[in-house]
Amino acid sequence: MNGRAFAGCVLCGFLVLVLVMAADLGALSQSATYFGVTFPNGDLAFADRVVDYLAASCVRDAYDDPEEALGPPDARCDGCEGCDGCDTNAVSLGFRLSVLDSRGYLIVEFVDNLLIDVSGADLFVYITNGRPCRVEISADGFNYIFVGETVGYPGAIDIGPYVEASDQFRFVRLSDVPADEDHSECPGASIDAIGAMGPVVQAAEAEAFGSLSLQPIGDLAFAFQYAPTTFYMILDSSSSMGEVIGGEVKLEIAKDVIVDLLENLPAGALVGVRTFGGNCSSNLLAPVAPLEAAALRLEILKMSPKGATPIALALEKAREDLTPIAGPKLILLVSDGIETCKGDPVAAAEEFLAAGFDLRIHVVGFDISRNVPARDQLIAIARSTGGLYFDANNSEELRQALSIVAPFSYTVYDTEGNVVFEGRIGQDGPSLPAGSYTVVIDSNPPITLTNVLVQDQSTTLITVEQENGGFRAKVDD
């Protein structure tokens, strides 16, 4: 060991000794310096409690304990001058192999101090392995403000550009920044400590917090795990769609349901609509473009039933329409019949994958349960791309089937009826003060769960699944 390294190690040992003596004397709030950053409130400056943690892909067991991010920096790594790799005294966020994976995140709370805007950097994140993380802050645990990305041991964040001078924050959410595949022992940012340059407060002022998570299971999970950026609808407008079921024309039912569906598609989605019918023809009702629900609604309502059922032609034209569009795509095909224009719709569907499309086709057979050959053909179309098939024999079942296209939204209310969170199932849920809540899921029909308990330092899980042609939600024990 050279003289400089030896001196560094001696200095590290001396600092550890000083800190231990200070703790023994009950002086945790005395100024302390960690790797070049002086915290006026010493060890009280660091995060005290884990609110929630979700590891993304490939995190080893040795690096998945979120409690390791609490308190002052204590990573050992190699040498004495900070870290440049994995350490069991830190927690890894992991990384996303693809957009289908969950983003890894860690939410912590400051119990005996606050995060405020001071002169210079306000928040320091000690990251052992040189990987960046996304940083958000919150005063209440469910409304978060993005304040940038950081990396380093420590990485510094100035919250000033994002907040008011009088704002006070208790919560920090760190999440992974998508990157190339990482096969290290601790992929994604490896978090050792999180310190805030804010005042000390009485621990009694801290409020108990837990979290809430709504997750789809079964076929619903399979459908929602695919995250398309483009939604393309192919609607049957052949003469059979002019038949009446339950006192309503089938095509009128389909139009009403499709119009309602547009309101639930994700913001910023690309949407296209094609119809088929007439003299074995297919009409592009709306080219793929950012969703404009009002204009698209008018076009859909103009549809009228006539002619044959050229499903294969519609799929071939859809392939042409979607060729210049990047990103994952979802086709929703609604039909009440079998191919009648001598095409091969299953082969046309298979050609999407052969052409290299990142795509699935979900199919709804509308009032087709007694037409076995037609139903078998539609099932084969869906399966050819790994999509789902649904039977719908009336307007409500059609509405339920089409809701599979986009995750349900949900709203959380407190005991006074105030909205405290709005989100979509399968996505990050809220951190909430411990207590009782009402959760309303925007399925069809809506599902209302009352007296949903959120407990301190725990996550309340609600699962949602399809059941008997409808949907069921329950709070897991």
Image (cartoon, rainbow, N blue to C red):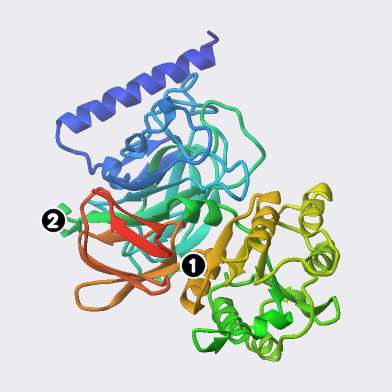
Instruction: Determine if residue 157 is in view.
Output: no
Q: Amino acid at mark 2?
A: Ala
- Please, is residue 33 above or below residue 231 in the view? above
360 left or right of 283 in image: left
Measured in 3D between alpha carbons, the distance from the residue under mark 1 to the one under mark 2, in whole angstroms, is: 28 Å
Closest to the observer: 310 or 273? 310
Give the label on residue 377, or none: none
- Element type at mark 2: helix
Q: Tell whether label 2 touches label 1 (CB within 8 Å).
A: no
Give the label on residue 162, or none: 1
**Label 1 vs 2, first from the N-terminus:** 1
Closest to the observer: 167 or 352? 352
x then y, percent, for residue 337:
69, 70
Q: Residue at x 45, y 44 (%)?
A: 125
Instruction: Determine if residue 126 is in view.
Output: yes
429 left or right of 332 in image: left
Closest to the observer: 152 or 232? 232
Q: Amino acid at mark 1?
A: Tyr
How many numbered tags mark residues here?
A: 2
x then y, percent, for residue 404:
53, 64
- Element type at mark 1: helix
Q: Quadrant of residue 294?
A: bottom right
Query: Label 2: which residue?
Result: 204
312 left or right of 458 in image: right
